[in-house]
Image (cartoon, rainbow, N blue to C red):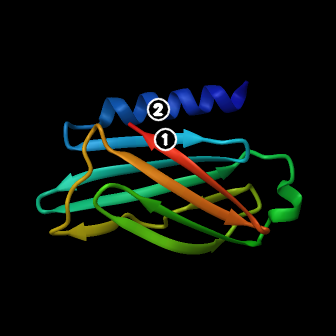
Amino acid sequence: MKKILLILVSAFILTSCQSKNDFYYKGDSNNWYAEIFTQKNGDQELKSYKIKYIGENLETLKNKDISFSFQSENSLQGPIIKKLSESGTLESNSPSACGGCDFLNKDSEIIFTIEWNGEKEEIILKN
């Protein structure tokens, strides 16, 4: 229950602070929840992400390398390899910037691909 409330409050805060050039994409699967926030700033697009393991085997994945990538109709980011935190999250430390690239829009879909322990899942993230 707390998890659902936290997600709803986070989504409300993000959407209330968004401008028409900011987009919040999210999606989940059996084992992962992923979100990306994009913000247009002049001729740059800033992206940040948060990924959370929601499966049942967190203890076996803590501090293990996780590989993931994000692909849209106009760009590919990754693969990125990071260690899963003790709490089961992966987050961008600072937004990454793309200058002169094609921007995402409200109708864009992002294919999030994640690999861990020989397993692989794809999630479609939508605004």
Q: Give the residue at mark 2.
A: 11
Residue at the image position 88 percent from the left and 59 percent from the top: 59
**What residue lies at 28% left-to-right and 60% top-to-bottom?**
74
Q: Residue at point 38% right, 36% down? A: 127
| Quadrant of the snapshot with the N terminus | top right
Residue assigned mark 1: 26
In terms of secondary structure, where does tag 1 sit?
strand
**In the picture provided, is 24 more to the left or to the right than 41?**
right
Give the image location of residue 5, x and y in percent. 62, 25
- Tell us which disc is closer to us: 2 or 1: 1
In this view, 84 is above or below 22: below
* Mark 2 or mark 1: whose residue is earlier in sequence: 2
Left or right: 92, with 61 as reference point = left
Q: Is residue 111 left or right of residue 16?
A: right
Q: Could you say where residue 14 lies in the image, as x and y percent from the top left?
A: 39, 36
In the image as oriented, which residue stretches furthest toward the left?
42
Distance from the alpha carbon under mark 2 to that under mark 1: 10 Å
